[in-house]
Amino acid sequence: MPNFQHIRWNYPQNEGSGFTLIPQSTVVNQNSDQYFLELATRLKNFDVMINHDLPHLLRGYLKERLRKAQQLQMHVMHKYMNDIEHISTLLNNNRNDSLNQKLRNELKLELNSFVNELSQYLQDLEPKARFIDHLKRQYFEYFNVAEQELDLADSVLLLEKALINNNRHVRILCSNDVLNNAKQSKLNKLRNQILKERKKNRNLQLIYADFSYCPFELHDMIILPLNKKINEKMLREPSRKARISPSSTQKNDGFINILLIGESGVGKSTFINAFVNYLTFSTFEQAKSNKPTVLIPVSFLITTGDNFQEHKIAFGKFDSTTTENFNHSGQSVTQRCRSYVFALNHMIGKKLRIIDAPGFGDTRGLDQDDINIQHILECTRDLTHLNAICFLLKPNAARLHTSFRTCLTQLFDLLGPNASQNILFCFTNARSTFYTSGDIALLLRSMLDSLSTRDIPFKKANTFFFDSESFRYLVALHNGIRFNGQENEEYFMSWSKSVEESNRLLNYVCKELHPYSLHNGWQSVKHAQLEIVRMIRPILEAMRNILRNFILWDMDSPNKSIVLWPQPVLRSSKLCTSCKRDPVQAGNFWIVPDNIHEFQNRCLVCSCHQNQHIVVDYKLKYKVFHHASNYEQNQMNDLINQMNFASIDFAYFLINVARSTTEDPFLVGLLGIIEEEKQICAQKKPNHLNLALVKELDELIVSHKEQMKKIQSNPPEDNLDAIYERINTVCTYPMIREQIAVTRENKNKQKDKHHEVQVSEKSTRGNIYLSTPC
């Protein structure tokens, strides 16, 4: 009998990560033992490469790609250990029949697919690691354009400005893996050219700018700074109508990304659960003999028999930390975007990511729809590409909610009209309409024709029909509910049809659609709107604090200054504007501290209405320094004027270009700050500094209104480049940059938590992983 036990791998100089399970047996000629012994050697080699060789060669670069290799390795190791345990159990039962042999062969095939995926990933990463190591040996710094938060990566000219900034002692070689492989001799020539320059000038800084992982279309290798005018074709950003090849994004991360959007109550959560099971179990018999995969907790009523006996079914784990809301009818169950990743083992190296977005048409009104749209847009900004945007509909709906039009319009405002070619329509509960689009087809066609983007396809190829009731039937069976023969037959047929449509959808997305690029350098009215909105609080707080310091220097002490000290907060936190906040002193100023409450579908701290809570990205604290500020007063005065002018431009853009509001949000914010300062003055004494601040803020409002009248009487041209230039400039101001940096740091931490957690290992064709909320 084989004996499976822990053995430690011995590495020279502590290479590798540790130990694993490998089989040790006196019966060495058994196929299973020999297979796992050989695989153990291969896994050891992977371990040394991932945990020793690659970190050494990468020299701290491409951390995300190295982390993904480590994640893939852990998935392989877990699968390897579980399969050993499974096969050991079969052998210990003293059964060597054909069924056991078949199961063992299936386990090996699945394990092979995991190992092959890891092997392929390392085959792509190792050459890049050796290339980076070679660059470092030749005095080049490696710069991955895709990883940098420049918002400038869509233009080589802007990249030159950002990295060089008139520094004559910098040379940047721009290229990517495709160009390097196709033009190896030119790469060597340009590299040698730069190295010759460095021999003459040892102060020359050399940078290799890698465009391999960003969607910017670099047509040829170039050296920055440019010594001559570059052909416009080389530097031109791909237009919204330009398509990237299927291999260009899928090669990057192996993900097939589908954004799922639907009206509240359409059954998105049930559809996701059902879709994963349709891809997992090709027949209903397989599904019945295994526990259903439930990614999202489900709760529903089902009736059986001639007397319509009602049964309440609950399946899955319900907890207080979920982003789903099951308590309010008409409100979207999904409160934030949430990603579900399905490893397609029958498509080696491919994973399907379904992004479940909050439902539109929420009963809380259009304002909530706007919030939900922002969640959707934030999630898509984190992706490199979208393969499909799937709208979920009911075939027998009597009308289309107006928010459906709003949702379409806002998505195209952000992504551009060419995203229309990646639209899919999926119908739930289609068994009731014999798997057709039913009454809604004419309504949908009419609405699509009325949009400014008139080329959204609505045809058989991009339309799919499902019956999620067959999944509910499966869950009910596992809850002990019995059905009659006719009901069983109907649900069996429904399952087969839904499996067929699931495979047709996947084939259509993979073979017929080109991925739609989502790059950080995009420019659109909607994107600019989002950038401005997140800057409102940083600008207002920076202006208030500059005025505080002016007053301190004039009325208290010229050697004292208050510094903003932003601190990250949990994504699930909000600021309560209703709960009482006791002012605290900072440099003889009274300041109302941020009242941050944890929020999970409801406030966990107070009972104030949800509308009295506002989302914040950071908590403001303050530090008092007993020395003069690093900035002269005239510099600070110029800074506050620049921020005031920027707030005018931004407010005009939001009202007249983006048309996202009818009120000036900066003016509203200033009025709110004044009201807060007046309340402080009513509560605390001495308050002479705060009274002086109220006076300064009143004058700032007068200036703001005057400038707003001027810009309205002489409107500027709608120049998107100009507004982005203003955004980038304001982001460089120290007090603004510090607040935004904390926001980005907080979001990066949240991204780090977006790890994949294995949910089920019983699938016959894939494994499911869950990503934490966006």
Image: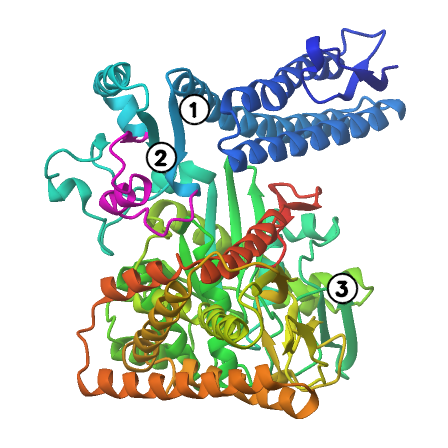
**Kind of residue at badge 3:** Phe
**Which SS class for mark 1?**
helix
Location of residue 254 in the rendering, given as x and y in whole percent from the top left corner: 47, 39
**Which range of residues does the magenta coloring cover?**
148-176
Q: Earlier in the sequence, mark 3 or mark 1?
A: 1
**Colour logic:** rainbow
The disc at residue 315 is 3
| Three-letter amino acid code of the residue under disc 1 | Lys
Height in image: 446 above or below 500? below
- Residue pictured at 50% horizontal, 60% vertical: 629
* Residue 344 image position (x, y, % from top left): 55, 41
For the question of whether residue 398 can be seen, the reply is no
Q: Earlier in the sequence, mark 3 or mark 2?
A: 2
Tell me the crowding category of disc 3: few under 14, some 14 to 19, or many 20 or more residues within 10 angstroms, Cα based.
some
446 lies left or right of 252: left
For mark 2, what is the residue?
A: 212
Q: Furthest-bottom residue in view?
A: 682
User: Is the residue 145 above or below the residue 686 in the image?
Assistant: above
Q: Quadrant of residue 684?
A: bottom right
Q: Residue 35: image x %, image y %?
A: 69, 15
Residue 91 is left or right of residue 72, and the answer is right
Viewer-proximal residue, 31 or 662? 662
How many numbered badges does the structure rendering display?
3
What residue does disc 1 label? 128
Residue in the image at 25% along x and 70% along y? 453
Frontmost of labels 3 and 1 is: 1
Task: Answer with left or right where residue 714 lies relative to residue 566.
Answer: left
Q: Nearer the viewer, residue 766 or 618?
A: 618
Type of the residue with mark 2: Ser
